[in-house]
């Protein structure tokens, strides 16, 4: 059932206008956890997909809640890697809608076991301006912002502008010349710090030594870590294989599955 947040969220005071009302599905108590926002391209390269998954998973296992916008690409990878019970998705529509439709299963899983929030009333469709407001809320909720892949003049770079205005620290992955030119420019202009060692970075944001149970500890992923053939994996976990491949959780090389 869609509800309204009935308490003040101090982090949102950094926004141009405090979002009120703020609607939600799921567990509002996740808002009290240590949070980091992860954003990036809808079409990241394979390196960015793998590193997004790794940093989100490692942070989540240390008790840090991952915030993102539910889009395809980096957003979906971050949500899945965190585990749906330790992630917050910020929607750009009313909570009666599932957008983008391709992420319907992920969104519904987060709504059931994690948290989906929106500043838009029931029935509100996706519009260009809604994504702008959604991005500001994503950035505000996290203590810092991680950008794992961004082209110049992209929507992700608009999120970076919000982080700079809010005084948020920004971290980016180190990329080769010609890739993720938006984040490379941030490094050149000294507006962001590069993540060279994920374990060292995560250690600086440890919220708990307790490992949170997530989807990444499921029988499905245990099976995938044995590097089975793609054909065997599809026979055993047809639904999970499709979603994991789409989110970047797994990759297929020479007919075999790799996490």
Image (spheres, rainbow, N blue to C red):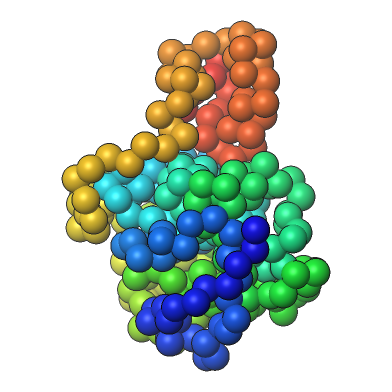
Decide: is 45 above or below 223.
Answer: below
- Viewer-proximal residue, 147 or 224? 224
Residue 147 appears in the rendering: no
Position of the N terminus, as image quadrant, is: bottom right
Give above or below for 165 relative to 33.
Answer: below
Q: Nearer the viewer, residue 144 or 164?
A: 144
Could you tell me which residue is drawn at 59 percent across and 44 percent down?
109
Relative placement, left or right, of 122 versus 52 is: right
Position of residue 86 measured from the top left corner of the image (x, y, whole percent) = 42, 50
Residue 189 placement: quadrant: bottom left
- What residue is rendered at 64% in x and 34% in y? 243
Please give the count of numbered marks on the rendered protein: 0
Measuring from the top left, give residue 229's x and y in whole percent: 57, 10
Return the x and y of residue 160 as percentages of the image width and height.
49, 74
Q: Quadrant of residue 118?
A: bottom right
Q: Residue at x 54, y 90 (%)?
A: 17
Q: Of residues 187 and 62, which is closer to you in this image?
A: 62
Where residue 173 sits: x, y (%)?
Answer: 39, 55
Would residue 12 appear left or right of 252 to someone viewing this image? left
Q: Residue at x 62, y 12 (%)?
A: 236
Can you name the residue that lies furthest to the bottom here?
16
* Residue 202 shows up from this direction: yes
Above/below status of 179 relative to 217? below
Query: Depth check: 4 or 20 in front?
Result: 4
């Amino acid at each position: 059932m869609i509800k309204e947040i009935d308490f003040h969220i101090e982090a949102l005071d950094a926004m141009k206008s405090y979002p009120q009302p703020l609607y939600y599905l799921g567990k509002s108590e996740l808002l009290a956890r240590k949070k980091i926002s992860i954003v990036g391209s809808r079409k990241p390269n394979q390196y960015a997909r793998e590193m997004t998954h790794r940093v989100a998973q490692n942070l989540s296992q240390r008790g840090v809640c991952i915030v993102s916008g539910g889009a395809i690409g980096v957003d979906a990878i971050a949500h899945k890697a965190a585990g749906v019970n330790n992630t917050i998705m910020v929607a750009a529509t009313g909570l009666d809608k599932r957008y983008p439709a391709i992420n319907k299963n992920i969104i519904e899983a987060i709504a059931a076991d994690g948290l989906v929030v929106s500043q838009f009333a029931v029935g509100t469709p996706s519009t260009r301006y809604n994504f702008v407001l959604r991005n500001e809320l994503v950035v505000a909720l996290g203590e810092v912002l991680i950008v794992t892949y961004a082209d110049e003049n992209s929507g992700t770079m608009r999120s970076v502008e919000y982080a700079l205005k809010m005084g948020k620290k920004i971290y980016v992955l180190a990329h080769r010349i010609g890739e993720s030119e938006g984040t490379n420019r941030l490094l050149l202009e000294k507006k962001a710090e590069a993540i060279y060692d994920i374990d060292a970075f995560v250690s600086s944001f440890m919220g708990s030594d307790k490992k949170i149970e997530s989807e990444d500890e499921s029988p499905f992923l245990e099976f995938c870590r044995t590097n089975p053939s793609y054909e065997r994996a599809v026979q055993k976990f047809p639904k999970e294989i499709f979603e994991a491949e789409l989110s970047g959780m797994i990759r297929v090389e020479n007919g075999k599955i790799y996490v």
